[in-house]
Amino acid sequence: MSGKVEFFFDFMSPYSYLASTRVEAMVGAAGGSVSWRPCFLPALLKATDNRGPGQIPAKLPWVVKDLSDWADFLGLPPVKIPETFPFLATQANRCALVAIDEGKGPAFCVEMFAAIWRDGRDPNDPVVLTDVLNRVGLDAERVLPLAASQPMKDRLKAASEEAVQRGAFGVPTFFIGDELFVGNDRLDFVVRRLKAS
């Protein structure tokens, strides 16, 4: 079995953020590699008749506490929910596709997640996107129009459809071959499976 772990995520997902802070180290220590796969979470939810935890009023206070507990457990700064929450992060997801094409995918993704969920910044603010892109060595003036182009829109849609076809119903979702693992809290199972293969 391949040691590649496909990591489907959306920047709008705080649990994807938590996974982003440790997936490379955990998978790498188990002898695997990570393929970062941005997708559009609302498309996954709609296609599978699912809802995010933030859409369930009774669950929302627990989610806020859970995120705080996870950040403390992982030694991270407290999760800072942006003032614009709930938000879509479509352009940031498409910027990730460009960054991946240019060999800067993991660096961009880690920085973008941190800007949103550590620093509380708006992922739809061009200033934020420009800052993150430039920080990882990408030319924002070139990347932003490319990310907004129809080919990148089509690629994000195709990745979302692929995730659903393979069984995903939310993010973060991890695949090792055809085997599916769902949730930040399943990363230990991902590592265990890698070590057993």
Image (cartoon, rainbow, N blue to C red):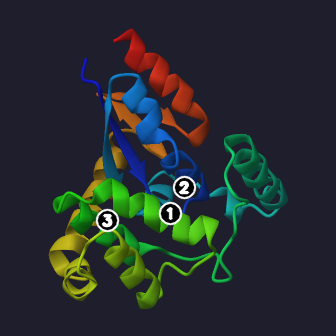
Tell me the CA gap for discs 3 and 1.
11 Å
Q: Can residue 171 be seen?
A: no
Q: Residues within 10 Å of mark 1 (few under 14, many from 20)?
A: many
- Residue at 46% x, 83% y is 128
Label 3 with label 1: CB-CB less than 8 Å: no
- Residue type at mark 3 is Ala
Q: Quadrant of the N terminus?
A: top left
Amino acid carrying label 2: it is: Tyr
Say which residue label 2 marks.
17
Q: Secondary structure at mark 3?
A: helix
Disc number placed over residue 113 in the picture, else none: 1
Q: CA distance from mark 2 to mark 1?
A: 5 Å
Q: Is residue 123 above or below residue 63?
A: below
Please tell me which residue lies in front, 151 or 161.
151
Q: Quadrant of residue 83?
A: bottom right
Mark closest to the chain's N terminus, 2 or 1: 2
Which residue is farthest top? Answer: 196
Q: Are marks 2 and 1 in contact (CB under 8 Å)?
A: yes
Viewer-proximal residue, 196 or 181? 196
Instruction: Please tell me which residue is depicted at 53% across the width and 52% down the height of the picture.
Output: 16
Residue hosting label 3: 96
- What element does badge 1 sit on? helix
Helix, strand or loop at mark 2 = helix
**Residue 170 placement (x, y as % from top left):** 51, 50
Give the percent coordinates (x, y) of residue 193.
43, 18
Mark closest to the chain's N terminus, 2 or 3:
2
Question: Real-space Cα distance between discs 2 and 3?
Answer: 14 Å
Seen from the viewer's position, the closer of residues 129 and 157 is: 129
Residue 30 falls in image quadrant = top left
- Tell me what residue is drawn at x 22 percent, y 68 percent: 98
